Image (cartoon, helix red, strand yellow):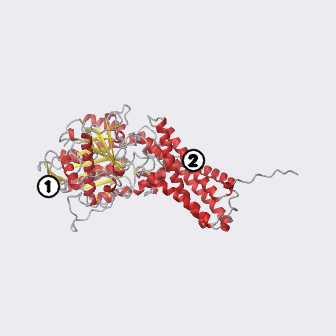
């Protein structure tokens, strides 16, 4: 008879806490693999062995904390369940069923995080937080843009594989008892270790080099998401550098002073009167806010294989093209608040989504004080990002959105195609023109957005390929159609048309605020204001669009705007205000100052038009002055908004109600 008996399972394999440890190590392994994939696919250009090791070690520290935090609920459950119940059939089914669901979600998030990084060059951030508020649009967009079926199948296979391995390794964990005291000690140990690691993290994220992409790779997606959600509505003064309020207003007033402007109120106010000729005609204003139509697509702005032949032709033959403009952020709501409200992009939510925006300045408000009617047209749902609410509360009489298009020729999950939108815009402007009153119209497009589909037969490229470049060409085609239709209308001769992107197509670049990916076009057309083709090389941003348009009209008005007229004033004082995640900054001709969480400040130098800006380790006296100006502008913007003083019109009960959205 043989005396060879199977070796007993190791004690850890017969322990429920060995199983918890296996979960912990599995999480670390999955995040480590994702980090290696991100490094391989999005390899930073100046990656050295020391920075690589720093990224891996810094990421490992963050992963350990998050893995501990995710294991704590399991260990807590093990405390609550008695030894008798732990091995019961119902409990085994619960553990394995719950394990499958948990790991299916974990593997799915790994895929999602990779695709998110591919789109935004970042871990989960404020964009991910915002998208959770609109699950229908986001889910359908993902389904149309990616091979979701394959991803789900892969997640299911990986989850089953993990479950099979765990069930074999820990088959004997059900019978081994643990006293309540021992179970409590295990929970206390895991919780204490997580609590000890928590203070070691910077809320801003990993910072192991001057390369923004490498810092993002070193971060943890779950940790980044929680930090973004927690700081959505943050106390600006508590997290960012400030100066005395008097100094902040003095510096901001100096920056906003310009030719033919006069401050109406002394002290802590930026309200000012802008001079002009009251006998000048009240020209109509049409702002075409184009989704993701960044400068990198425009042939007239340097692309050799242009994707915008219609806009190139318009710029070459009759338009005023601004060649050195930057978006204030990388979200539509940032372009919204910049182009329409000329308001700095504060960290946290855009004012389009905040709760104190029922009476803030917009170009529509300014023009309404001069007798204008107004309309906003959007191809999607006005509920998204609170755009309808912001528009109708701040100067727009009506808001036309997707539900007001009875028979659209083509739609995506984001709304009606640009052609349908522009055709409706021409009809709306025609009706407004017939009233004999001037009008302000804003049109926000949606076609240049994932899944990048559009009507067939409009451009040679097949929309089934779902490529961004093709959607850009269609957006340009639709703009060309709009201008051809508008030329036939009576309002063509007395209207200023401005084509401007809400932001660039995607984020890339090393610095905390990647300026090169923020470049956007501004093309102004209209025989009443633009007499011939020209180029304007002044440095500016989204905030400067309304002041520049009002300057071209040439009539007097009062303003709270932070932007400047790019056709007036000294070019040496030009600047652009920018936001990326939780960083804000001010860009001048060769300097960028970035303000971050925990009152941090970074300085960059170089020409953003020609190369990446480089981190400046020793700022000069002029840099420190620029830092104080940057601090002042954002501090004043926060103060005005939080105290509801970014307004000229006080709301009154007798104010007439807005006309029904989209109504006749």
Vertical order, 636 against 120 (above or below): below
Residue holding disc 1: 264
Q: Is residue 457 visible?
A: no
Q: Earlier in the sequence, mark 2 or mark 1?
A: 2
Q: Residue furthest right?
A: 1
Q: Position of residue 174 (x, y in %)?
A: 68, 61
Which residue is at a point 74% across and 54% down the rendered structure image? 8
| Quarter occupied by residue 85 | bottom right
Q: Is residue 182 visible?
A: yes
Classify 10 Å Cα crowding around label 2: few (below 14), some (14-19), many (20 and above): some
Which residue is at a point 14% across and 44% down the rendered structure image? 259
CB atoms at circles 2 and 1 under 8 Å apart? Answer: no
**257 or 315, which lies in front?**
257
Give left or right: position of 63 versus 243: right
Q: Residue furthest top?
A: 304
Q: Nearer the viewer, mark 2 or mark 1?
A: 2
Classify 10 Å Cα crowding around label 1: few (below 14), some (14-19), many (20 and above): few
**203 or 657, which lies in front?**
203
Residue holding disc 2: 29
Where disc 2 sits, the SS reads helix
Q: Position of residue 197 (x, y in %)?
A: 48, 53
Where disc 1 sits, the SS reads loop
Vertical order, 40 against 379 (above or below): above
Report the Cα–Cα distance between label 2 and label 1.
62 Å
Q: Position of residue 79 (x, y in %)?
A: 59, 65
| Quarter occupied by residue 171 | bottom right
């Amino acid at each position: 008879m043989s005396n060879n008996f199977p070796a007993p399972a190791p004690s850890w394999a017969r322990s429920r806490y060995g199983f918890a440890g296996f979960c912990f190590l599995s999480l670390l392994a999955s995040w480590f693999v994702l980090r290696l994939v991100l490094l391989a696919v999005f390899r930073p250009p100046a990656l050295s062995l020391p920075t690589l090791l720093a990224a891996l070690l810094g990421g490992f520290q963050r992963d350990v904390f998050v893995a501990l935090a995710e294991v704590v609920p399991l260990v807590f459950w093990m405390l609550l369940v008695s030894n008798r119940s732990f091995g019961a059939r119902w409990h085994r089914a619960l553990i394995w069923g719950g394990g499958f669901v948990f790991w299916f979600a974990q593997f799915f998030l790994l895929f999602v995080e990779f695709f998110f990084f591919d789109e935004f060059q970042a871990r989960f951030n404020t964009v991910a937080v915002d998208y959770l508020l609109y699950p229908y649009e986001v889910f359908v967009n993902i389904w149309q843009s990616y091979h979701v079926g394959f991803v789900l199948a892969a997640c299911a296979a990986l989850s089953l594989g993990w479950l099979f391995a765990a069930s074999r390794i820990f088959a004997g964990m059900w019978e081994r008892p643990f006293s309540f005291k021992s179970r409590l000690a295990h929970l206390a140990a895991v919780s204490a270790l997580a609590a000890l690691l928590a203070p070691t993290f910077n809320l801003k994220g990993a910072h192991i080099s001057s390369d923004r992409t490498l810092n993002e790779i070193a971060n943890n997606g779950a940790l980044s998401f929680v930090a973004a959600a927690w700081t959505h509505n943050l106390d600006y003064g508590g997290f960012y550098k400030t100066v005395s309020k008097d100094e902040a207003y003095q510096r901001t007033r100096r920056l906003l002073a310009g030719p033919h402007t006069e401050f109406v109120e002394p002290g802590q106010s930026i309200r000012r009167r802008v001079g002009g000729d009251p006998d000048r005609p009240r020209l109509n204003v049409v702002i075409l806010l184009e989704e993701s139509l960044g400068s990198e697509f425009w042939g007239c702005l340097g692309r050799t294989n242009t994707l915008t032949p219609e806009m190139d032709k318009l710029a070459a033959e009759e338009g005023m093209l601004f060649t050195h403009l930057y978006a204030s952020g990388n979200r539509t709501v940032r372009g919204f608040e910049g182009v329409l409200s000329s308001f700095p992009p504060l960290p946290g939510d855009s004012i389009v989504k905040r709760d104190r925006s029922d009476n803030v300045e917009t170009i529509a408000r300014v023009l309404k004080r001069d007798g204008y009617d107004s309309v906003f047209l959007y191809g999607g749902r006005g509920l998204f990002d609170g755009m309808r609410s912001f528009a109708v509360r701040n100067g727009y009489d009506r808001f036309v959105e997707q539900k007001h298009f009875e028979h659209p020729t083509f739609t995506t999950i984001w709304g009606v195609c640009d052609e349908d939108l522009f055709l409706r815009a021409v009809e709306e402007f025609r009706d407004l023109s017939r009233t004999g009153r001037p009008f302000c119209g804003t049109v926000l497009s949606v076609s240049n957005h994932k899944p990048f589909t559009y009507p067939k037969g409009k451009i040679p490229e097949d929309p089934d390929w779902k490529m961004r470049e093709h959607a850009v060409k269609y957006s340009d085609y639709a703009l060309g159609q709009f201008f051809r239709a508008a030329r036939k209308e009576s309002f063509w001769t007395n209207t200023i048309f401005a084509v401007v992107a809400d932001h660039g197509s995607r984020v890339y670049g090393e610095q905390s605020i990647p300026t090169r990916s923020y470049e956007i076009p501004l093309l102004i057309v209209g025989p009443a204001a633009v007499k011939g083709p020209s180029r304007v090389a002044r440095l500016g941003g989204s905030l400067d669009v309304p002041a520049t348009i009002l300057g071209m009209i040439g009539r007097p008005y009062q303003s709270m705007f932070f932007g400047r007229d790019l056709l007036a004033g000294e070019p040496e004082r030009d600047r652009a205000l920018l936001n990326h995640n939780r960083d804000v900054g001010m860009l001048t001709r060769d300097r960028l100052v970035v303000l971050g969480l925990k009152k941090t400040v970074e300085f960059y130098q170089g020409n953003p038009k020609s190369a990446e800006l480089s981190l400046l380790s020793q700022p000069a006296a002029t840099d420190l002055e620029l830092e104080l100006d940057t601090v002042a502008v954002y501090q004043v913007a926060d103060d005005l908004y939080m105290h509801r003083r970014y307004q000229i019109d006080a709301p009154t009960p007798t104010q007439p109600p807005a006309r029904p959205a989209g109504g006749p």
